[in-house]
Image (cartoon, helix red, strand yellow):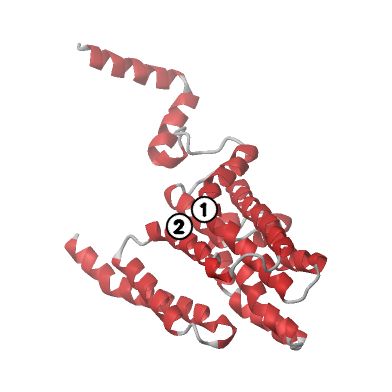
C-alpha cells in the first residue's frame, strides 16, 4: 500500500474513533463557510472588532460628509449645542441637510418630519432586507441595530453574509461597523459645527461620501439583472434630482427594483436553458 493510502486509512480510523472529529468533518463539507477557515468569529467581541476593521477603509466618505453636515447645521442659525443634538438624534446627513432650510423658514413641524421620513425611506428597504438575519434577536437588540443602520454598514454586512450565510455573532459585526461610523460621524459633525463657515464651499466635500458608497456597492453588480437595476436606478435618480424633498432618490430606488425584477424574469429562463 502506498504512503498516501496509509494516510487516508489512518485519517478514516481517527474519525471513527472520535465522533466529535467526525461531526467537524461533516460540518466542514456541508457548510464550508462555517468551518474553521478564519472567517467565523469565535465571540461577540471578535465580531464587533471585525465590523470595526471592515468599515475603516470607507470612512474617507463619512468624514467629509460629517464636516459638511456640521457646517450646514451651524450656518442655519442653530446653536452649537442644538446642532450637535440634532446630529445625534437624526443620524442621517441627507435628511438633516434637507430639513435645515425648512426649519429656518419656519415650516410646520409635520412638514419637516415628513421630509426627513421620505428621504430616509431607503432605510425601510435596508431593514426589511436585514431583518431575516436578526429574526431571533430580542427587541432591544433590534432597536439598537436599527439606530446604527448606515448605508456603508448595511452594504458591508450584505457582502459578508452573501459569502457566509451562517455567520456567527453577526449582530456584533453589524453593531461594530455601525458604532464606528456613528462615532466618526458625530465627531466630524461636531468639528464642522465648530468650524462654521470657514471651509470653502468649492472644496465639494460632500461628493467624497457619494464616491465612497459607489466604491462599496460596485462589487455587488455581478449579473445582467444587477446591472439593469443599478443603471436604471441611477439614471432615474439623476433625472429626477430636481423633485422636491429628495423624491428623486425614492423614484430611483423604485425604478431600480422594478428594472432588476424585470431583467431577472428575462434572463433567468435563458440561463436555465443554456445550462
Classify 75 as above or below 51: below
Q: Would you say the residues marked 1 and 2 are in contact, meaning their CB atoms lie under 8 Å apart?
A: yes
Question: Mark 1 and mark 2: span between their CA atoms?
Answer: 8 Å
On residue 58, the disc is 1
Which quadrant of the figure has residue 227?
bottom left
Q: Is mark 1 on a helix, strand or loop?
A: helix
Left or right of 212 in this view: 73 = right
Which residue corresponds to the image point at 59% horizontal and 57% vertical from the top-left? 63
Q: Position of residue 110 (x, y in %)?
A: 74, 85
Left or right of 267 in this view: 15 = right
Classify 19 as above or below 105: above
Which quadrant of the figure has residue 49?
top right
Label 1 vs 2, first from the N-terminus: 1
Which residue corresponds to the image point at 68% horizontal and 53% vertical from the top-left? 183
Which residue corresponds to the image point at 62% horizontal and 65% vertical from the top-left? 199
Determine which residue is flagged by label 2.
216
Question: Counting other residues with Cα less than 10 Å from the Cα at mark 2, is it few (<14), some (14-19), or many (20 or more)?
Answer: some
On residue 195, the disc is none
User: Which residue is nearer to you in this view: 40 or 82?
Assistant: 82
Q: Does residue 245 appear in this view?
A: yes
Q: Position of residue 22 (x, y in %)?
A: 44, 27
Amino acid at each position: 500500500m502506498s504512503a498516501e493510502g496509509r494516510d487516508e486509512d489512518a485519517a478514516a480510523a481517527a474519525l471513527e474513533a472520535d465522533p466529535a472529529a467526525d461531526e467537524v468533518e461533516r460540518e466542514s463539507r456541508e457548510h464550508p463557510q462555517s468551518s474553521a477557515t478564519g472567517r467565523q468569529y469565535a465571540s461577540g467581541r471578535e465580531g464587533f472588532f471585525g465590523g470595526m476593521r471592515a468599515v475603516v477603509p470607507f470612512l474617507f466618505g463619512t468624514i467629509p460628509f460629517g464636516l459638511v453636515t456640521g457646517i450646514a447645521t451651524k450656518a442655519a442659525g442653530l446653536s452649537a449645542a442644538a446642532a450637535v443634538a440634532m446630529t445625534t438624534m437624526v443620524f442621517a446627513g441627507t435628511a438633516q441637510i434637507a430639513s435645515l432650510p425648512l426649519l429656518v423658514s419656519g415650516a410646520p413641524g409635520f412638514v419637516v418630519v415628513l421630509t426627513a421620513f421620505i428621504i430616509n425611506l431607503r432605510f425601510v428597504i435596508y431593514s426589511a432586507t436585514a431583518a431575516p438575519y436578526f429574526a431571533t434577536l430580542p427587541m432591544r437588540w433590534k432597536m439598537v441595530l436599527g439606530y446604527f443602520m448606515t448605508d456603508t454598514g448595511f452594504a458591508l454586512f450584505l457582502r459578508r453574509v452573501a459569502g457566509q450565510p451562517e455567520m456567527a455573532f453577526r449582530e456584533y459585526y453589524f453593531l461594530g461597523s455601525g458604532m464606528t461610523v456613528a462615532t466618526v460621524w458625530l465627531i466630524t459633525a461636531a468639528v464642522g459645527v465648530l468650524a462654521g463657515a470657514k471651509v470653502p464651499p468649492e472644496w465639494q466635500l460632500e461628493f467624497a461620501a457619494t464616491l465612497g458608497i459607489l466604491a462599496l456597492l460596485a462589487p455587488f453588480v455581478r449579473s445582467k439583472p444587477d446591472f439593469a437595476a443599478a443603471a436604471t436606478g441611477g439614471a432615474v435618480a439623476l433625472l429626477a434630482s430636481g423633485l422636491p424633498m429628495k423624491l428623486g432618490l425614492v423614484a430611483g430606488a423604485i425604478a431600480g427594483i422594478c428594472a432588476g425584477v424585470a431583467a431577472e424574469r428575462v434572463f433567468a429562463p435563458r440561463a436555465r436553458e443554456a445550462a
